[in-house]
Image: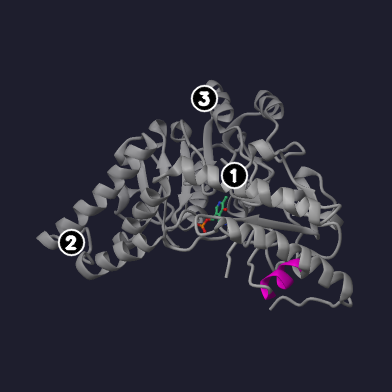
Amino acid sequence: MPYFDYNATTPLYPEVKETWLDTVNNNWQNPSSPYQSAARVKNLLEDCRQYLADVFQCKKEHVIFNSGATEGNNAILHHILTHSNESEKVIISAIEHPSVIETAKKLFPNRFELLPVDNNGVVKLEILEKLIKKNKICLVSVMAANNECGAIQPWQDVQSTCQKANIAYHCDASQAIGKIQCDNLFNSDFVTGSAHKFGGPKGVGFLVLGNDSCNFNSLIGGAQEMGHRSGTENLAAIKGMITALKCSLKNFDIKKENLQINLKKFIDAITKKIPGLNIIGNQNNRLPNTVMAIMPNFENIRWVLNLDKLGFQISTGSACATGKNVPSHVLAAIGYSNDEIKRSVRISGGWNNSNEDWSQLANAFEKVSENLKNSPKTTIVIP
Ligand code: PMP
């Protein structure tokens, strides 16, 4: 069953399953307990923290383990709320994940500026500069790469603009880690990530703090994670995440190039097979595994369900919005109409997809196109 929805979640690398099982069998003790077996677990936990610090080139004590990017994003916004005053605003890019954008709207109802994007889905830096000049800003949040259209954001520029203006910068790197080079990303004040986006378990992730953010408030009070995030650490999941990162960094350039080649061939094939199909964004500035398209006709859910019947799993956009019947805020921000958004589909591949899977997916699109033209219009009810 070829799976092409890696941006929603990924299968576990086999090595991750082994690590997870080995840890729940042999190192299940509470890392905070006062005996030798627990001290061993604590050491393993700290080895995981050191590994992330080495990969991300940051200080070990700035790496906080948590349940994933939704939690990390929420924790940062709550922290900023308690460390800012009423006259300061937050700038949030218009294409952020709902865990950023919805939380920011709720916590900062009158202190909230949306940073627009261009027609390739990339934030407009000149508007960021203007907003910073016009307002007192306490946080800028711009993700590394967008989960729906795959557009890579200019985080280096946002980071240096924020540094010059002495403003905290948060980067949600959930979709970038394991897919593209993340040089310099961890010089930001706050970076969030999620293991299940790069072959690790669900319900585990991290938050990396910058040098000046170490007075970080915990969203959940208590003692673990240096007081920054409480609750007994899930070593099996954390070790699984580290193994997943190691697997995704192994032969990184070759895997990335293969994905890019397959994605390009796939795009060439479907644009020929389905006239009128519109690819979103700039091919040279997109995640190597992701493409979003506006289909020339038929509602996106009909494409998705029909492809599913043929054994191919793709999505209409963000899994977090599927079934909610709300048009994608990302595509709306890029400037697509509601009618176009209803025809959008997202294909996001990964390491398990062979060349053959990609070419069969293009053929399946052609088949579904024929089937839909010949089938009566039916109302779709999402369970
Ligand atoms: N941010 C982005 C960009 C995402 O794609 C996702 C997952 N859809 C999240 C945050 C939420 O991550 P998690 O599932 O770890 O809560």
Q: Who comes first in sequence, dot 3 or dot 2?
A: 2
- Estimate how packed mark 2 is, as few (under 14), some (14 to 19) or many (20 or more) residues with alpha carbons within 10 Å: few
Q: Position of residue 188 (x, y in %)?
A: 47, 33
Q: Which contiguous range is marked in magenta? A: 303-309
| Residue contact at pointers 3 and 2, CB within 8 angstroms | no
Tag shown at residue 260: 1
Which structural element holds mark 2? loop
Which residue is pictured at 72% across the width and 72% down the height? Answer: 305
- Give the residue type at disc 3: Gln
Q: Who comes first in sequence, dot 1 or dot 2?
A: 2
Which structural element holds mark 3? helix
Q: Is residue 44 above or below residue 211?
A: below
Q: Main secondary structure of the magenta part?
A: helix
Q: Position of residue 63 (x, y in %)?
A: 35, 44
Tag shown at residue 33: 2
- Give the residue type at disc 1: Gln
- Estimate how packed mark 1 is, as few (under 14), some (14 to 19) or many (20 or more) residues with alpha carbons within 10 Å: some
Q: Position of residue 47 (x, y in %)?
A: 24, 48
If the picture is divided into quarters, which one holds ligand 1?
bottom right
Instruction: Report if residue 263 lies within the magenta region.
Output: no
Does residue 149 appear anywhere in the picture? no
Instruction: Report if residue 307 lies within the magenta region.
Output: yes
Q: Is residue 53 left or right of residue 277?
A: left
- Picture quarter with the N terminus: bottom right
Does residue 249 appear anywhere in the picture? yes
Q: Nearer the viewer, mark 1 or mark 3?
A: 1
- Give the residue type at disc 2: Ser
Residue under pointer 3? 163
- Picture quarter with the C terminus: bottom right
Q: Nearer the viewer, residue 14 or 327?
A: 14
Is disc 1's CB within 8 Å of ligand 1? no
Which structural element holds mark 1? helix
